Image: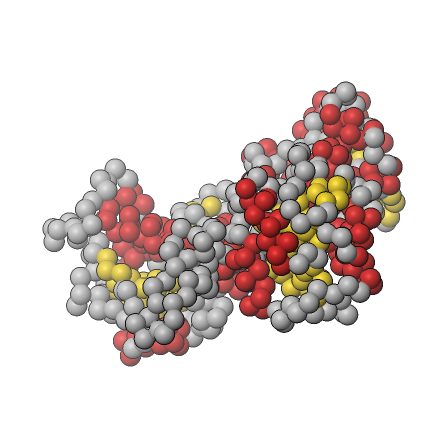
Amino acid sequence: MPNGDVLTAEQTGAAALRDPQLSVPALPRLRRGLAVQPVSEGLVVEGLPAPQVFRGKAATALLPRLLPLLDGTKDCAALAEELGIAPRAVFKALSLLWMCGVIEDTPSAGSEQSAAGDALAAELADHLSRMGDSTGANSCWEQGALRLTTARVALFGTGPTATALAEELGPSAPVVRVTGTDGVPPEGTTLAVAAALPAAELSAVAAACRERNLPLVRVAVFAGRARLGPFVHPDCTPCLDCLLAEEADTEDDPGTPEADEEAAALTAALAAHDLFGFLSRSVPSPYPNQWRTVALDDLKQRRHSGATRPGCPTCSAARPADPAPEATEVTEDPRPAPLAARYEAFIGFPPHEYMDPKGHQQHYKPSNLALQRQEKTWPVCPRVELPDPDTARLAGRAYGPEEAGPDAAADVDAQTLSLVLATTAGIRVGDPDFLRRWTPSGGNIGSVLAHLAVRDAAGLEPGLYGYVPGEHRLALLAPGTAALAGVPGSGPATLVLTGNLGKVAKKYHSFALRVTLLDAGCAQATLRRVCRTLGLPRTPVRRWDERAVTGALGVDPRVEPVTAVTDLGRPL
């Protein structure tokens, strides 16, 4: 397997063949506005979101012949015939060029996409094509052009922010200015934008959009900040009031909206960028799940998201909380959204129609692939070998009851613990180029770290151990039963699972906690099934002292939290 420093055609070709979410262009063509320059032992392609460098034999022998043929009229077979090489070799090269953003597909002649592209200004067409790989939402730049031409933006507001926003967005998409206080979007509107509206008018527009099931984006500028949202849609977001409550929790008092023309112009330009990305899907946009506030003096920004407040009369199914017995007056204000709900809202996936396929390609980024084989090995701790896991013990066995009888109970020994560790947090032996695990893991990263507190298990001395899945062995962290003082449990062995949050965060960032907890749930499901099949008593520990357990393991709970503690075997 490659060392993870570079992305190869072999990797991308194999991924494109087995992954249905990867779709190499059928009629490939170079993106518009690119510059291809030969360099020592390769090529450089500039004009994309990031320059792409191609090196190696194919970059000097194949790509200079292939690139001039990519005009959107030839499929893979035709290209292979003209080049005189195997179609599979051409497919690998095309898959690499596509995942690097160099090529895109070609629309059918006479299609709506093609017609929309013909009507677009050349400069805008170049931008849609060059930057389209930043989201991957459009198979060709004409698809982005069609999204823009079919959009109908109703812009509410009469102040300088609304005027500047109309000027910024007008050349790219149809914009209709709406004045008056009734707040009704015109027929055919696909997106409403409220620019610096007073609170009463904003509420009226939000109510009208909610009644008509239309998305709404609020744009405002006050307290020295551009407020580029929130995005509100009855189908997929909380109501405007719940979202604005999130912003109010983290920002200064909004005060009175400013009318400064310079602030309005900068706010409009920033908002137009986010709106253009949302409408065209050609460049990233925080909508619909998030929105930005930007400080106008230094352009520092903060991302926001919001969750439904329990008791909200507009978007919550929960009733307002009953007043406390000692309360002197009754209030029906919604309660603040719980922290867990706010976190889920921030990291949650948008609806399918708003997802950027480019994010899926990050699974094949070399640094992310390398994470799959990175593991904790405790190199200075004594090695303790484990027997090979006897998976035949699981074959053909009925899925037993939760409480196995005494005659069915498996012994808690090195052989049984080896099988439990392998299936819960281990790696399957097989294809060296594609790492497989016994238990599913988000991104195949393997965030679950297994530890054993051994009190009385045949074949293993008492002590605290860490499991190294790549070598299927243990590392002795601390010998003797005294080392187990911080670990709860009373069985012959206690399995402690932690989550390698720091490792997952290298790929998933703020989403890492969710992936880590999902992995922990999968590991516990496997553990439960294996124990029931073997007849091994299993007792989950419901509560534990996080500091005591992590102290015994020698880990930092901020980057390696404890996710499960389970007693194995009958209590001693």
Q: Toward the viewer: 17 or 207?
A: 207
Colouring = secondary structure
464 up-or-down from 240: above or below: below
Residue 180, position as x, y percentages in the image: 70, 48
Residue 213, position as x, y percentages in the image: 56, 40
Residue at the image point whose x is 22% and y is 65% from the top: 492
14 up-or-down from 310: above or below: above
Can residue 217 be seen in this snapshot? yes
Residue at the image point whose x is 62% and y is 59% from the top: 199
Q: Toward the viewer: 340 or 135?
A: 340
Asked if residue 378 lies left or right of residue 530, the reply is right
Residue 439, position as x, y percentages in the image: 40, 48
| Residue extending farthest front | 181
Image label count: 0
| Residue extending farthest bottom | 482
Can residue 28 be seen in this snapshot? no
Tell me the quadrant of the picture where the C terminus can be found.
Answer: bottom left
Residue 185: image quadrant is: top right
Residue at the image point whose x is 80% and y is 52% from the top: 163
Residue at the image point whose x is 49% and y is 68% from the top: 559
Q: Toward the viewer: 216 or 541?
A: 216
437 up-or-down from 78: above or below: below
530 up-or-down from 483: above or below: above
Residue 215: image quadrant is: top right
